[in-house]
Image (spheres, rainbow, N blue to C red):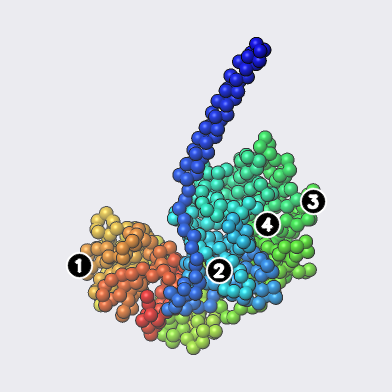
Amino acid sequence: MRRTRRVLLVVIPAALLVVAVALAFWSAQRTLARSAGLARTQHQLGFTLQPFDPAAAQARNSGFEPVNSPDAFTSGAFLSGDLYLAGSAGLSIYSQDGTLRRTLRTGFELPVAPIVTIACGHLRGVNEDQILLATAGAGILLLEPRPNAALLLHQLLPDSPDARDLTSLLPLPSGDLLLGTRHGGVLLYDGATLVPYAATADQAHEITTLAAADSTSILIGTRNAGLFYVHAGTVQHASAASGLPDDQIESIAVANGRAYAGTPLGVAQFDLNHSDGSVALKPERILAPGLFAHSLAPTASELLVGSLDQGIQRIPLGTHPRLRNAALGLEGESSGQRIDQFLAPAGPSAPLYALAGGSLLLRGEIGWHSALPPSSANLADRNISALAFAPDGALYIGFFDHGLDILSPTSSESIRHFEDDHLFCINRLALDPVRQTIAAATANGLVLFDRQGTPRQVLTRRDGLINNHVYTLGASHGDDRLLAGTLGGLSILEAGAVKRNFTASNSGLKHNWITALAATPEGGWLIGTYGAGLEILAPSGSFSPIELPAGAPRDLVINPNAILVTPSHVYAGTLGRGMLVRDNATGRWAVVTQGLPSLNVTAFAEREGELYVGTENGLVRIAEARLP
C-alpha cells in the first residue's frame, strides 16, 4: 500500500507536468499558427478572378480595324498536340498539322497588354491542364482549351499594378503557381490567395525568369541581382562577385543534374548535385564567354544558345567546349536573328523548335527552316514611329528600327519596303508643300522621296545638317513665325531669328521638354510635353492646362510629334496611356484605349475622314465618325 502511494506521488505530478507541457506546446502551436495565418493574411495581395469573354471584347472594339503586321511570337507551349504561340500581337493556336485554328489579338479579343510568356500547368481547383498567359500589365489569362467547345478564358487581375506586370510563370507539381514580376519580386498563387513567395518575400527583385531544378527546388533569375536557388529550405545566391559572367540573368535551363544560366556575357554552368545549404552556389564553368545568351536548350551532347543578334549557337558540352555557329538554313534569312525561346513537344524523340525574329523555326537535319505556312502581305514591322499621307493617297509608315513601308492607296496588299543605312530609324515623316513629296527624317539623315515614292536625295551632316535637340516644329498661323519645341523649352522664331523663349521658370509652361506641337482651331497652340501632358498656348502668350477626363494623370508623356488636328477632332498619343481625343464640337477630351493594340500611341495620319493610329505594337484604322 505504501509502495502504491509512493508510485502515485511520483506518477501523478509527472503526468500533470506532461499535460502542462502538452498544453503549453499546443497553445504555442496555436499561437504560432494564428500568427502565421495573420501574417499571411496581412501579406495577401488583392485580386479578382473572373471570366474574360473574347467575343464581348471584340464587340467593344468593333470600330477599329488592324492593318496586317508580321507575327511577333516570343513564347510558346504545347498542350494536347496543339501549339500555342504568343507575343505582343496576341495568341495563335495551331493544330498538329500546322493549321491555324484560332487567333486572339491584343487589344481586340484580349486585353491591351502584350503576352510575355506562356506556361502549361494544372492549378489547384481545376480539373485539367490549362494554358497560362502572363501579360505585361493585365495579370494572367487562364485558358481551358475545350477542343469541342468555345475557348474558356479567365483573367486573374491583381489590384497592384506591380503584381499585374509579369515576366515569367512557373507552375509547380503541387498545383501552386509562381509569378515573376518586373518590379515586385516573386508571388505565389495557390488557387485561393496571392502572396509574396515566402523564400524570397523580403527581396522584391526585378525577376526575369523562373525554372524548376526538380520537384521541390526553384531557380530564380533577376535583372540585376544574379541567380537564386531555393532548395531544401535554404536560399543560395550567385552573383558576378561569386563567378557569374553578369548579374543579369536572361535565361535558365536544367538538364542531367546541371543548371545553365544565360547572361549577356556568357553562360554559367552549375552542378546542382553538389549544391546544398552548406555549399556556396558557384559556377562550375563559364561557357561561350561574351555571348548574349537570351535563350537556352541543353541536349545530351551540346547546349543550344539563342542570342539577340548572333542567331543560334551550338556549344559542345565536352571537357573543352568550343563555340560553333549554326546557320539557320533559311533562304534569305540571316543567322543574326533574335532567338526568344526553344520549345519541343513531350516525348523522347520530339522535334526542336525555335522562336526566331517572331516566327517559328523547326530544326532539321541540315539546319533550321520555317515551320508554318507563309502569311499574307504584311507590314515590315509592328513598332510604328511615324505616319504621313502623300498627295496621291499613299500612306508612308515609318518604323522605329526597320525603315519604312509605302502602302498603296488602291490595294492594301501592295506594300513597298525601303531600308538601308539612311532609311533605318524613322523619326518623322512630313509633306513638302512645295514639291508635294514626302521627306523622311531619320537617325542618319534626311531622305527626300519623289512623287512616285522613290528615294531621290539624302542629306546628312556633310551636306550642312546640324545636330540639335529640337523635337518638334510648327508653323504659325498666317505669318512667318516658327515654333521650335526643344529639350529646354519652347522657342519662337521670326525671320530665322529667335525672338522669345518660354521655359518652366519664366512662364506658365509646366515642363521644359517639348515633344509635339499643333495649331488649334481656336488660333492657339497645343503643346505636348514629356511629363506634364498637354497645355494650350494662347495667341496672347499665356499657358493653360487642358481639362482632361476624370482619372487621367497630369504627368502624361506625349510621344514625339504624336499630335494631329482634323476638322472634327484633335488627337494626342501618350506613352502607355492610350490616346487622347478632343471633340472639336464640344471641346471635351476623352481617353481611348479599347481597340488599340498597345497603350503606347506613337503616330497619327488622317485622310478623307479615316484615321490611322500607329502604336509600338501595330497599326489600326477607324472612320472618325465611328470613334467611341
Q: Position of residue 7 (x, y in %)?
A: 65, 16
Q: Is residue 603 left or right of residue 520?
A: right
- Mark identifier at residue 318: 3
Total numbered circles: 4
Determine the residue located farthest toward the front in the rendered image: 1
Q: Tell which of 307 and 121 is nearer to you.
A: 121
The mark closer to the camera, 1 or 4, is 4
Crowding near pointer 1: few (<14 within 10 Å), some, many (20+)?
Answer: few
Q: Label 1 belongs to which residue?
A: 540
Residue for badge 4: 296
Q: Is residue 18 above or below residue 228?
A: above
- Residue at 55%, 60% in the rendered image: 134
Residue 507, picture quadrant: bottom left
Q: Position of residue 280 (x, y in %)?
A: 66, 38
Residue indicated by mark 2: 152
Q: Earlier in the sequence, mark 3 or mark 4?
A: 4
Asked whether residue 433 appears in the rendered view, the answer is no
Q: Residue at x 51, y 48 (%)?
A: 195
